[in-house]
Each structure stands twice: as structure tokens, then as C-alpha cells.
Image (spheres, grey):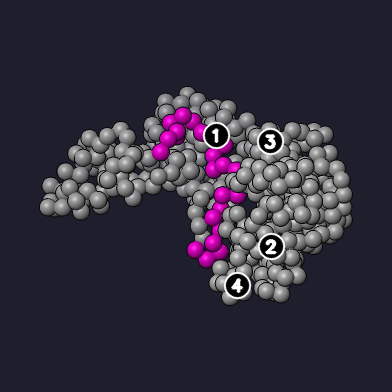
Amino acid sequence: MMDRVVGTVVRGIRTPIVHEGDSIEKIVVESILKASKVEGFSLRDRDIVGVTESVVARAQGNYASVDTIARDLKHKFGGDTLGVVFPILSRNRFAILLRGIAKSTKHIFLMLSYPSDEVGNHLVELDQLDEKNINPWADHLTEEVFRQAFGETIHPFTGIDYISYYRSLIEESGASCTILFSNQPKTMVLYTKNVLACDIHTRERTKRQLLAAGAEKVYSLDDILSASVDGSGYNPEYGLLGSNKATEETVKLFPRDCQPVVDGIQEILKQRTGKAIEVMIYGDGAFKDPVGKIWELADPVVSPAYTSGLEGTPNEVKIKYLADNQFAGLTGDALQKAITEHIQGKKENLTGAMEAQGTTPRRLTDLIGSLCDLTSGSGDKGTPVVYIQGYFDHYATKV
């Protein structure tokens, strides 16, 4: 056998534009087979197909309007006031939801977390808080006090002052608005007992704290459009979480019923190629931008569905640790042979082993989803399918 000279290879796969009613399984398979033929690569066992959640939802026609969001909220809350806590700062993810929220009530108490939102968009820097002697975990600020301390807060990439932007969206939708700044959910109960928790990964804790503080009606975004309203799209598990702006009046929801999709793609590829290929649907990955500080992770999960071979976490040793410790006295072919044999004989579970320290302790689907998200991007690359080869190979793998 020849030595492998290339490890993991990741390809963005171009597909036709996906429309409602299309067979996403057929589009994905045909696009991969066409790419394989044109680009001259062969499909192998344990390759991985990643399909972005967006095209799955598009094929499902999983959309909802601003007015539908408003109807569901009005049905759940009623009343004249509504507290909205911990929304992320996003034109794509939250702005259009805020329009629907505003249409459901007369007055909104909008409470923003600071210095940043949940996914890392900063309103102010920590140094600014220090200068003003403000403690974000204890101090509750009104909009007037916040502005006196920090003035305009312009996002470095979008150029938007989200405080002014969110106020304008609420008022244009017919509601009045009071903006607050606090990291304590109980702060909202001082203003209203009806509260919509808009955080993503911490929503259960937020709801629990609100109820403990005396809130009466408490829902989170996954409770809104968890069932169809007048024939609208919906997601029984995630509601509005994971939604994106589609038009000025509609959002595309996170896809539902995803497991049959990945299982179907895997089965068709098996029938067409004879290869056992893993498949996952992916949304936002997890990686921090060093300038904008955003963590991504605006979807409720990185992968809503995946085939069974993607379960678990990596079981890897750290090659540089072996080279610097067990085999520090070896060089050249002798070092390569020793490390290769060590990898071939590694234990099935290396949790806690010194030789595994420094490897990435994350789930496979979160790692691979992040890889897919960075590869496909969110703009005009036109590659909503990602094909990964060699991900499960290691230093000892031969051709």
C-alpha cells in the first residue's frame, strides 16, 4: 500500500437553486454524482455529506409571515404590554421577528443584555464598562443612562446602532417602546408580567428565573409557531429559533422532520454507488471572529439530524505529544514507524489519557458542522452541499 499524502479534503458542491416542493434528496445526490464525474474524484466509504439547513427548509416550504407571528403571539399573550428579553442583535435573525412581535401588542419593554448579546455582538467594550464603573451583572440601566455613558454604539461590520434600529422597527410596526439594559431576567418583572424570552441556548434558565421572580405568562421563541397558524410553516421542536429573513414580510423557519432526509440521502447514495456515506444537515457552526467577536451559533443546534456514523466525539491522540514524550529519542523513519504503530494500537476510549490532551473535546457533528458552515459560507458561493473525504482517516491510514 502507498502512504497517504493528503488528509481531509472538503469540497463545496454547487446545486441548482432549490424551490418549494423540490426533492432535496434527489438534488443532493445528483449534484454530488455530477461533481464527482466532472472533478474526477471517487466516492468512498465513510465520506460525509453536509446539507445546509436553509435548502432543506426551502424545499419544505417552511415559511411564515410577520402577521402570522403576530397572531400567534397575540393568542398566547393577549394584553397591552409585552416584555422581550435577551434578543440577539441581527438584521437577518431577529429584526423581522421583532416586527411581528411589535404588531402583537401596544407597548414593548425591550431588554438587551450587555456588554454583548448571546452570540457575541458587542454593544460596548469591557474597558468602557470599567471606565464608567458599571457592573453588567448587577447594574440595570435605562436607555437614557446607557446613552449618557456610552453614546452611539455602532457595530463594527454592519455600521448599525442596534438600539436605534430596534426602536425604529418597533415604532414603525405600531407599538411604543421602552428599552432597558440588564443581564438579570427578573429585571423585566418590574415592568410587565408577560415576557417573551428571546435567547437561544440559555432560554430554559431565563424562563425559570422569570417565573420564579413573579412573571405570569412566559414563552420563548421555540414556543412561537411550534404549530401551524392558518396554514403557515412551523417547527414543533424549535418554533422561531433558527429562523432567517426571507423577504421583508416573511421568515424561513428551521427545517423540520430532518431525520428522514439524511437517512434518505444515505440510502440513495448506497444504491447508486455501493458506498456507506454519512449525511448531516447543518446550520450555524461555532467559531469566534477575532474582530467582531461573534461566536455564530444563532441556530438552536448545529445539526438537527445526522446518520448514525456521526454520533460521538473524536478519539484521537496528539502526535506532537507522542513526538515530544514517548518517542522523543527517535527521528526520521523510526519516529514515523513508532507513531504509526501507536496510533494503530490506540485504545477505543482515550478519555482522560495524557496522550489525548489538547485534542478537540467536541461532538463530531459540531466539529463537522462548523467545517461545513465555513466552507459553504452564507453569501453567493452557491454551494449549499459540502462533501468531505478523509475526515476519519489518521496518520496511519494507507491508500
Residue range in magenta is 290-313
| 249 to the left or right of 7 | right
Q: Residue at x 57, y 72 (%)?
A: 130
Q: How far is the residue under mark 2 from the one under mark 1? A: 40 Å
Are the residues at dot 2 and dot 4 in contact (C-beta closer than 8 Å)? no
Label annotation for residue 65? none
Q: Pointer 3: residues within 10 angstroms few (<14), some, or many (20+)?
A: many
Please state which amino acid type lies under the numbered disc 2: His
Please state which amino acid type lies under the numbered disc 3: Asn
Image location (x, y in percent) of residue 350: 31, 38
Q: Quadrant of the C terminus?
A: top left
Q: How far is the residue under mark 3 from the one under mark 1? A: 14 Å
Label annotation for residue 235? 3
For label 2, the residue is 140
- Specify which label sits upstream in the sequence, 3 or 2: 2
- Specify which label sits upstream in the sequence, 2 or 1: 2
**In the structure shown, which secondary structural element does the residue marked by tag 3 occupy?**
loop
**In the structure shown, which secondary structural element does the residue marked by tag 2 occupy?**
loop
For label 4, the residue is 133
Magenta segment includes 312: yes
Please tell me in which quadrant of the rendered image residue 338 appears: top left
| 183 to the left or right of 286 | right
From the viewer's perspective, is residue 399 above or below residue 183? above
Q: Pointer 4: residues within 10 angstroms few (<14), some, or many (20+)?
A: few
From the viewer's perspective, is residue 264 above or below residue 19? above
- Specify which label sits upstream in the sequence, 2 or 4: 4
For label 1, the residue is 305
